[in-house]
Amino acid sequence: MTPTFTATGRRRRVFVPVPAGVLPPAPQPPDPPIYRELMRAWADRGRTLPGRHDPEWAELAAPPGDLSAPPAPRDGGR
């Protein structure tokens, strides 16, 4: 914090954040063994895992390709 003075002469502290990228990121501790085993079991069963790319979700969450075309009728246009 940086000390500053107000117009009345009172001292106050102002928070001045450190610019991004100045400090190195804190190291992440490794996952406990029980979580590593659980993630390995999920991966073996083909389940989605946190922090891993999920092609099905990427396809579902992608924006539609052409917004100018009207949607196809649900009843086949009949």
Image (cartoon, rainbow, N blue to C red):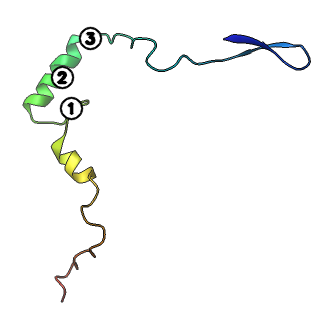
Q: Residue at x 43, y 18 (%)?
A: 21
Q: What is the three-letter code of the residue carrying label 3?
A: Pro
Residue 16, by quadrant, is: top right
Which residue has dot 2 on it?
Answer: 38
In front of the other: 39 or 72: 72
Mark 2 → mark 1, Cα distance in angstroms: 15 Å
Mark 1 → mark 3, Cα distance in angstroms: 16 Å
Q: Taking 20 as reference, is 70 left or right?
A: left
Q: Is residue 62 above or below residue 53?
A: below
Q: Which mark is first along the chain, 3 or 1? A: 3
Q: Secondary structure at mark 1?
A: loop
Which residue has dot 1 on it?
Answer: 52
Q: Which mark is first along the chain, 1 or 2? A: 2
Instruction: Estimate the x, y position of residue 14 in percent, counting from the top left.
Output: 71, 17
Closer to the eye: label 2 or 3:
3
Q: Secondary structure at mark 2?
A: helix
Q: Is residue 75 above or below residue 3?
A: below
Badge 2 vs badge 1, beta-carbon distance below 8 Å: no
Q: What is the three-letter code of the residue carrying label 2?
A: Leu
Badge 1 vs badge 3, beta-carbon distance below 8 Å: no
Which residue has dot 3 on it?
Answer: 30
Q: Which mark is residue 39?
A: none
Q: Residue at x 10, y 36 (%)?
A: 46
Mark 2 → mark 3, Cα distance in angstroms: 14 Å
Instruction: Estimate the x, y position of residue 34 in percent, counting from the top left.
Output: 21, 15
Q: What is the three-letter code of the residue carrying label 1?
A: Arg
Q: Is residue 4 above or below residue 74?
A: above
Q: Is residue 40 above or below residue 12?
A: below
